[in-house]
Image (cartoon, helix red, strand yellow):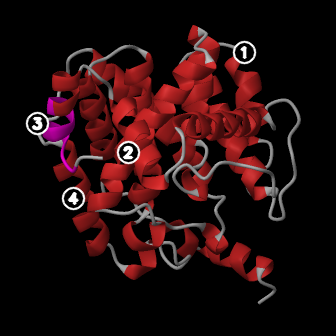
Amino acid sequence: MFNTQEKVIEYCQKNHCRIYDIVLDHDSENTRTSKEQIILKLSSMIDVMEESSRKTLEEPRSTNTGMIDGFAHRMFLYSKEEPVSGPFMAQLMAMAFSTLETSASMGRIVASPTAGASGILPAVLMMMKEEYGFKKDELTNALLTSIGIGQIIGKYANFSGAEGGCQAETGSAASMGAAAIVELRNGTVEQCFHAASIALINILGLVCDPIAGLVEYPCTFRNANGAVNAVISADMALAGVKSIVPFEEVTQAMNDVGKMLPTALRETGIGGLAGTKTGRRIRSKFLNE
């Protein structure tokens, strides 16, 4: 995969291809795996994403702490009413909640790109499938596109909340999801990068402050927010709105900001919401302190 937005766009224009073509060629060559095998693996990952994004919509599951139990079910029921954000957005959030609840109750998920941000891509892909009827091959290409965006993020920053705060986790996932949506909607390669950039910009500086150090609260809210962020960022890009800062520079900025965050706000369970009176009480109860 190329290192810059400009190089990717230039290559795609010259070779009449898409981001997903570059990713597939690159991964096949570097892993010495056939393209057919890679696509088969991605197809099975999409199946897991669909399962996790729907698992607790109608039947809530219990977690050890109970902090996020039933959120997906409540949001899903609300999506059938007249939500202010509209049925699409409400169900999108419900699906993001579902994967986090599935993870917290020891269910199977795809860490995309991390467990802490695992609700975003499944919600985005499955709602696009439900709303527009996209087929498996189209979703696979969208997932490959998101992987390409993730590979560039990985070159300039990282996906660890402990290293860069929640911006590195849910920010990266939203960025990847935004590009996937643009791909599904037949946007240009350049628009994929604008969407990815906007999504990261929207969440720049977000701290990671999980109560009791668990990937539950406030992680689940930020996954729902990240899914919505992906959608609105994709819409901005598809409308012709552009990020004047190239994608790789946005990721570099995210990395720099992450390094500036104090340790207490980087997944340590010390600061932010984790440091509140309620957060400390839950931590003590969970750890039997």
Residue 206 or residue 29, whichever sits in front? 29
**Nearest-to-viewer mark from 1 and 4:** 4
**Element class at badge 3:** loop
**Taking 264 as reference, is 115 above or below it?**
above
In the picture of the structure, the residue carrying the numbered disc 2 is: 26
| Residues in magenta, as a range | 3-10
Snapshot quadrant of residue 202 = top left
Looking at numbered disc 2 in the image, what kind of residue is underneath it? His
Majority secondary structure in the magenta region = helix
Work out whether mark 2 precedes mark 1 in sequence or the reverse, and give the earlier one.
2
**Badge 4 local density, few (<14 within 10 Å), some, or many (20+)?**
some
Residue 229 or residue 285, whichever sits in front? 229
**Taking 275 as reference, is 230 above or below it?**
above
Quarter occupied by the C terminus: bottom right
Looking at numbered disc 4 in the image, what kind of residue is underneath it? Gln
Separation of marks 2 and 1 at Cα, in angstroms: 43 Å
Work out whether mark 3 precedes mark 1 in sequence or the reverse, and give the earlier one.
1
**Nearest-to-viewer mark from 2 and 1:** 2
Separation of marks 2 and 4 at Cα, in angstroms: 23 Å
Residue 94 at x, y percent in the picture = 67, 33
Does 66 sit left or right of 97 as displayed? Answer: right
In the picture of the structure, the residue carrying the numbered disc 4 is: 252
Separation of marks 1 and 4 at Cα, in angstroms: 41 Å
Separation of marks 3 and 4 at Cα, in angstroms: 15 Å
In the picture of the structure, the residue carrying the numbered disc 3 is: 244
Work out whether mark 1 precedes mark 4 in sequence or the reverse, and give the earlier one.
1
> Is residue 8 on the magenta stretch?
yes
Residue furthest out toward the top:
132
Residue at screen point 22% across, 67% down: 256
Residue 116 at x, y percent in the picture = 58, 57
Snapshot quadrant of residue 215 = bottom right
